[in-house]
Image: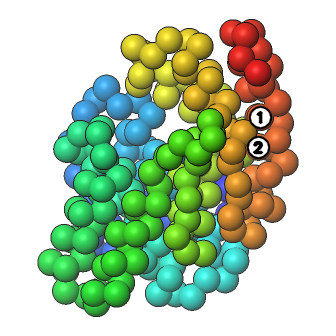
Amino acid sequence: MNLESSQEENGKCVPSIPIVQYILKTLAESLPRNLTYHAAAHTYEVLRDATLLAVEDNLPERDLHLLQVAAAYHDAGFLEGRIDHEERGARLAEHAMRADGGYNDEEVGRVGRLIRDTKLVRDRGMLVQIPSSPLAGYLLDADLGNLGRSDFFEKVGLERQEVPVTSEVDFWQNLLALVSSKKWYSSAGRTRREDVWRQNLEAVKARAAEWGIG
């Protein structure tokens, strides 16, 4: 399946994991409507890309299962608020896994760490995500997958709508810091995303230069 799949194809990558089905339904029904970028559609895209990258790289079935749980819950914290949403999402996933009863403590901990790894941190002027394990690289490549996709500027527009109080200079400065620092951690991610990411990076540099950023 092509990683530029349609929304209909996104659904084909939704696993029949009860806690995944539950959180996707909850996100669709309960996320704040002012989340234009971090809407339920984004979670579907991350779940789709994480699944396809993992399958392409032949990850073990149980790793794929845990990755899918993490992808489904990675932005669930937005149900409770934007601040520290990664930590909130991790806790929601951990609670759901324990309540389900089909996961051991090690697996619950792994999923929590995967979600916490999606947090963006400042590092010498750059905005980066830092994977704590090889499996986390697949979630990070999926979470920021649009940086290496042809729909990148469409997603930029949705993000801009979501944070309208930010000045144009601050917005493009942060975007440049994010796109410039992106590393593709999975083999499939590098193969599928690097070429378009480089094109998008050059376009962001040009747009940022219009605001005196560079």
- Residue at coordinates 52% horizontally, 87% vertically from top-left? 61
Q: Give residue 112's position: percent from left, percent from top.
A: 35, 69
Q: Is residue 190 left or right of residue 77?
A: right
Q: Total number of numbered labels?
A: 2
Which kind of residue does numbered mark 1 sit on?
Answer: Leu
- Residue at coordinates 44% horizontally, 79% vertically from top-left? 65
Query: Would you place residue 104 above or below residue 81 in this image?
Result: below
For label 2, the residue is: 197
- Residue at coordinates 44% horizontally, 67% vertically from top-left? 114
In this view, the residue in front, 146 or 168, is: 168
Q: Is residue 73 left or right of residue 131?
A: left
Which kind of residue does numbered mark 2 sit on?
Answer: Trp
Q: Is residue 31 visible?
A: no
Q: Give residue 198's position: percent from left, percent from top.
A: 82, 41
In this view, the residue in front, 83 or 68, is: 83
Residue density around tag 2, few if under 14, some if 14–19, many if 20 or more, within 10 Å: many
Q: Which mark is residue 201?
A: 1
Q: Is residue 42 left or right of residue 91?
A: right
Asked where in the image residue 17 lies, by quadrant, the reply is: bottom left
Q: Quadrant of the C terminus?
A: top right
Residue density around tag 1, few if under 14, some if 14–19, many if 20 or more, within 10 Å: many
Residue at the far left: name it: 99
Q: Give residue 99's position: percent from left, percent from top.
A: 15, 78
Tag 2, which secondary structure?
A: helix
In this view, the residue in front, 51 or 117, is: 117
Asked where in the image residue 155 lies, by quadrant, the reply is: top right
The answer to whether the residue labelled 1 contacts the one labelled 2, judged by CB atoms less than 8 Å apart, is yes
- Residue at coordinates 50% horizontally, 21% vertically from top-left? 160
